[in-house]
Image (spheres, rainbow, N blue to C red):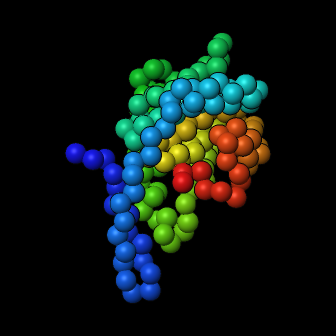
């Protein structure tokens, strides 16, 4: 069975269906991008997650802690992947999500949708979120004005 997706777009009063081929990501390429992103002094953790929150590439910066047990991290990854998927239902009305951020007392957690995957990042609590997002999007090989998930 094909994993292609059906896309519906409205043109006037007419809905047009088209088949969108599943986007395949090169996991090795994203492993290298994760390592490049980890070079940023303000980042503790970066990981490419699938739609179920399973880590596909990346991990924690050596010698750094993200304040979570392995089980807690797994839970956060699953929740984050679920939230990213749920946000897509408003894309037609509000536009595509470039990134989301949650500033907590001890860390900042950010997500960047990439096709049907998500890049999760844990950074220092005092980070400038927009500047960091700009740097991450640049390292992902995208432009700020371009939607990251296309």
Residue at image coords 77%, 45%: 131
Q: Quadrant of the N terminus?
A: top left
**Drawn side of residue 40 relative to residue 63, left or right:** right
**Drawn side of residue 82 relative to residue 127, left or right:** left
Q: Please provide percent x and percent y for residue 114.
A: 53, 45
Q: Please provide percent x and percent y for residue 22.
A: 39, 48
Residue 3, compared with residue 11, is above or below; it is above
Residue at image coords 74%, 29%: 40
Q: Nearer the viewer, residue 46 or 114?
A: 114
Residue 142, compared with residue 123, is above or below; it is below
Q: Quadrant of the C terminus?
A: bottom right
Can residue 105 be seen? no
**Drawn side of residue 3 relative to residue 68, left or right:** left
Furthest residue in direction top, as rendered: 63
Residue at image coords 72%, 43%: 138
Furthest residue in direction left, as rendered: 1
Q: Please provide percent x and percent y for residue 28.
A: 54, 26
């Amino acid at each position: 069975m094909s994993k292609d997706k059906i896309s519906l777009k409205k043109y006037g009063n007419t809905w047009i269906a088209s088949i969108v081929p599943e986007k395949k990501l090169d996991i090795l390429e994203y492993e290298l991008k994760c390592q490049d992103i980890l070079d940023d002094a303000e980042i503790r953790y970066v990981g490419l997650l699938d739609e179920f929150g399973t880590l596909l590439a990346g991990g924690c910066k050596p010698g750094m802690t993200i304040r979570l047990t392995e089980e807690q991290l797994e839970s956060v990854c699953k929740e984050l992947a679920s939230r990213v998927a749920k946000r897509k239902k408003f894309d037609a009305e509000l536009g595509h999500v470039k990134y989301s951020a949650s500033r907590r007392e001890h860390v900042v957690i950010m997500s960047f949708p990439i096709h049907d995957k998500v890049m999760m990042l844990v950074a220092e609590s005092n980070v400038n979120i927009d500047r960091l997002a700009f740097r991450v999007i640049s390292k992902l090989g995208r432009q700020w004005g371009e939607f990251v998930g296309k």
